């Protein structure tokens, strides 16, 4: 990553590879629950945010969001907001296209940029002014159908975070500028977390600080067996059962089976891939650097050659590189000249690719194999290596 | 697509699938010439645009771009611009990381959103206020190295547009707000094009209207054999050999082999995927709708079942759908109930997927097969079908 200004980062090639892998895990789980990928604009006209009152401040309107939105006028005086979320945009799309209960349910998602006028643009990539978000939206003909899908989405989110390597806590929370209903947050325990959560050490109960009315050590209000534990955590996702409020404000009505016009039931669901990447680094690292879980590692293998002036060593490294590529393995080959073995090793630890391979005079016709999170070093033949890394 | 406001569109699921396929073709050709994918921010501080004078108007500064940029203040008075291009951002990244000729050349690209304060936000998706762009940037230690890479990029662009199904003309052009040097545009002939170009009917010579000093019918100034032809066209890409101007303005200097500090040679290269999609529709359609080239079609096969109330027909359609999916074929199954065959057929023609399959009482144990751009209708067995669509 490279910082352009407070709260705003360029994702460099290795970091971008991590993001695309995080996105792919999310994409697979969204597609598995029949959500469809699309893309919505980032520049929004003032009028659409006026319909729900979110253009205004929290003092003017129940969900007023002026404080977090970037709002501005172009040179002709036309007013715009930058996307801080997309509920209103989805609603506009749906009201133009949905007429009957037969058109419902609908679920769509996109990966796109969000802008938030954060006063506390700190914690690096964990809280940016500009960041990536996967946001999904679903519309339903009944509350029962919304809540059934909401539960499906909750399970899909647990799958996403579990596949990414996290142990995730699902906590009930306040809806902020999105809804007056209670919502759910997905929290990863970490000492650098900005959130405080309370969870049961026995069952799946959890609440965040804003709504919990009790203290650590209390008996769990759900299972009555476990004890309430307090923890610092990072929020990596949240889901909102928005109800019919948005559809009522924006006139997103459909004709139901009984012939009556009704507002649609609506939910929204967010995961921030850049924040997920930051959380992965917080959770998976040691004093030497990052330890990427395999599923999101920018490459699977980090190949280092030592003693560059010997053409035979270079040739051997090239052969291993080509064989691995042919076998479909993602390899980062550190073929830099005039860089010492020590620097190459510490860069490899810092970058955190799961497997490090070394070719040098000392390794003979074998290859040195080491996993990032283990101390054991082995010498393998090329065939042994190929078997190992393909698993 | 769905219009949010003038010049701004949501890409719906089918359109988004087309964009991801266009992006994949571009990605493959960028990777093939060793450009690395990354992602840069969209919100930029005023200071960085001040360094090259592009924050100001064309009257104040040689490449002043105030007229096309969205510029605004946040509530604390801090000034920002929305990305209309990324040269300055790349330069900032490079000057922080490049010190020696050994660090060069570098080539990076990203797919991201661009904003342009277009007065003439018309022509649908062809000229938007907000659109997608693949922009690549390269930095080099010498002019010779830049121009060698520039030529490689030109060939990569020709490959991209050829793979997408276009017959593309490469024309020399003026550099606009990017450079005082001549640049190259990639133009697709179309009667709805906003550009006028002149090209040779015999060799690869071409120039756009702003720089051509002659008239249609002249002898080609390059090969002296062909004749100059005038045509209306749509610009789908452009490449800029920017020279050292940006590096000089922004202090992006490296230490060369001779120990001297020198400014880097810089090039930038753009393709607009959303504009490419619009151009594909302009070029590949008939009066019934779109005719997508296979390589970008949202799905390869459009499956229609007629006479839904017969469970046997539904079951057969489901079997064909599952067999095709298992074979790795992308299928859009129009399983709508209460929609007539006529509507399904005209929707299929409108959407423009390459192959249409029909299952009905009339087709018996065969499947009706028709290609979008042909009139011939065939009856195939499931095995024959699988062989056909897998080719």
Image (cartoon, coloured by chain):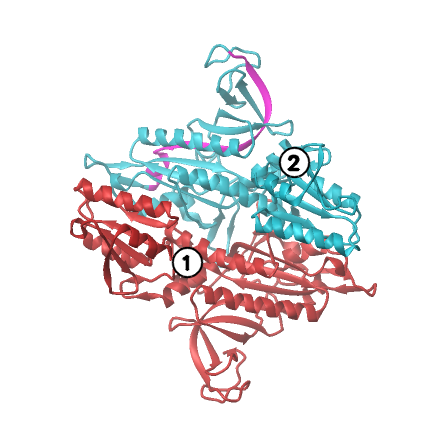
Chain colours: A red, B cyan
Magenta highlight: main SS: strand
Where residue A73 is drawn, which disc sits there?
none
Instruction: Tell which subunit mark 2 falls on.
Output: B
Crowding at mark 2 (Cα within 10 Å: few <14, some 14-19, many 20+): many
* Image quarter of the C terminus of chain A: bottom left
* In front of the other: B351 or B85: B351
Q: Position of residue B96 (x, y in %)?
A: 31, 48
Q: Is residue B59 visible?
A: yes
Residue drawn at x 69%, y 56% is A94
Residue drawn at x 54%, y 12% is B227
From the viewer's perspective, is residue A96 above or below residue A218? above
Residue drawn at x 49%, y 10% is B225
Where residue A296 is drawn, which disc sits there?
1
Residue drawn at x 54%, y 35% is B164
Q: Position of residue A259 (x, y in %)?
A: 83, 63
* Helix, strand or loop under label 1: helix
* In front of the other: B364 or B2: B364
Q: Which residue is mark 2?
A: B291
Where residue A124 sits, quadrant-wise, is bottom left
């Amino acid at each position: 990553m490279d910082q352009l200004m407070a709260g705003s980062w360029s994702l460099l090639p290795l970091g971008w590879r991590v993001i695309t892998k995080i996105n792919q895990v999310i994409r697979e789980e969204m597609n598995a629950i029949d959500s469809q990928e699309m893309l919505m604009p980032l520049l929004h006209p003032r009028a659409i945010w006026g319909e729900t009152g979110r253009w205004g401040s929290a003092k003017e309107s129940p969900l007023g969001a002026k404080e977090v939105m970037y709002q501005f006028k172009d040179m002709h005086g036309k007013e715009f907001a930058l996307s801080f979320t997309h509920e209103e945009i989805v609603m506009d799309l749906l009201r133009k296209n949905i007429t009957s209960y037969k058109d419902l349910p609908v679920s769509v998602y996109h990966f796109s940029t969000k802008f938030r006028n954060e006063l506390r643009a700190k914690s690096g990539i964990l809280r940016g002014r500009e960041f990536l978000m996967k946001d999904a939206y679903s519309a339903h003909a009944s509350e029962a159908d919304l809540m059934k899908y909401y539960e499906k989405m909750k399970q899909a989110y647990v799958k996403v975070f579990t596949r990414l390597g996290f142990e995730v806590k699902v906590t009930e929370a306040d809806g902020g500028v999105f809804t007056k209903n209670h919502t759910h947050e997905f929290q990863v325990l970490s000492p650098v977390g900005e959130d405080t959560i309370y969870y049961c050490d026995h069952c799946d109960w959890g609440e965040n600080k804003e709504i919990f009315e009790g203290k650590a050590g209390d008996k769990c209000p759900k299972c009555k067996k476990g004890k309430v534990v307090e923890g610092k955590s990072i929020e990596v996702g949240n889901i909102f059962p928005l109800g019919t409020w948005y559809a009522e404000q924006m006139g997103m009505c459909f004709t139901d089976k009984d012939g009556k016009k009704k507002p649609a039931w609506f939910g929204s669901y967010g995961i921030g891939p850049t924040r997920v990447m930051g959380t992965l680094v917080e959770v998976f690292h040691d004093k030497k650097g990052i330890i990427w879980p395999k599923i999101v590692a920018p490459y699977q293998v980090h190949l280092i050659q030592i003693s560059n002036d010997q053409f035979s060593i270079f040739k051997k490294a090239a052969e291993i590189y080509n064989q691995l590529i042919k076998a479909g393995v993602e390899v980062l080959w550190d073929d830099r000249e005039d860089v010492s073995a020590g620097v190459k090793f510490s860069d490899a630890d810092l970058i955190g690719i799961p497997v490090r391979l070394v070719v040098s005079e000392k390794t003979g016709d074998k290859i040195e194999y080491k996993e990032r999170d283990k101390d054991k070093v082995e010498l393998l033949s090329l065939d042994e290596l190929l078997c190992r890394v393909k698993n």
